[in-house]
Image: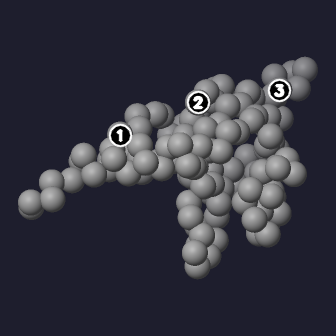
Amino acid sequence: FWATDAEGRLSFLSEQALRDLGQNGAELIGAKLTEVFRDVEEGTGVSQRPLAFKLKAGSRIEEQIVSVGLPNEEREGSQTRWWRINARPLQDAKGRPLGYRGSAIDITSQDATELQTARQSQVDELT
């Protein structure tokens, strides 16, 4: 599970998520959600609206595939974590945004092969 505040900063990651992300997972708290949950690169075969667009519109997030972690977290031997996230926006009684509450499923192992295959299908090895 995860949550953001009204400014779009990550305010909560479940203990399981922190364990999955390793020792530096706690450093993600307070970072902008779009810096932690990054959109899948073009050319991967995944078609979806950018996460920033959905957040700005106050839309529900459904089955969004993102890579997880801060860009400067590239640790030697670490691999990119891929999550499929779902979330709903929260509002106060006057309709003002309070942030998002959501869940995530780690799809790193199941989708790594699919993403790599989709990438390779976009590149002509002969040129």
Q: In this view, does 74 lie to the left or right of 103?
A: left
User: Of helix, strand and loop, which one carries label 1?
Assistant: loop
- Residue that numbered label 1 is attached to: 45
Q: In percent of the image, x 51 and y 47: which residue is there?
A: 39
Give the number of the disc on residue 63: 2
Check contact, mark 1 vs mark 3: CB within 8 A: no
Q: Residues within 10 Å of mark 1 (few under 14, many from 20)?
A: some
Instruction: Say which quarter of the image contains residue 31.
Output: bottom right
Q: In percent of the image, x 43 and y 48: which residue is there?
A: 113
At label 1, which amino acid type do we have?
A: Gly
Check contact, mark 2 vs mark 3: CB within 8 A: no
Structural distance between the alpha carbons of marks 1 and 3: 34 Å
Q: In percent of the image, x 9 and y 60: which residue is there?
A: 126
Q: In percent of the image, x 60 and y 55: which residue is there?
A: 81
Q: How crowded is mark 3: few (under 14 residues within 10 Å), some or many (20 or more)?
A: some
User: Of helix, strand and loop, which one carries label 3?
Assistant: strand
| Foreground pick, 67 / 56 | 67
Can residue 123 be seen at all in this image of the molecule? Answer: yes
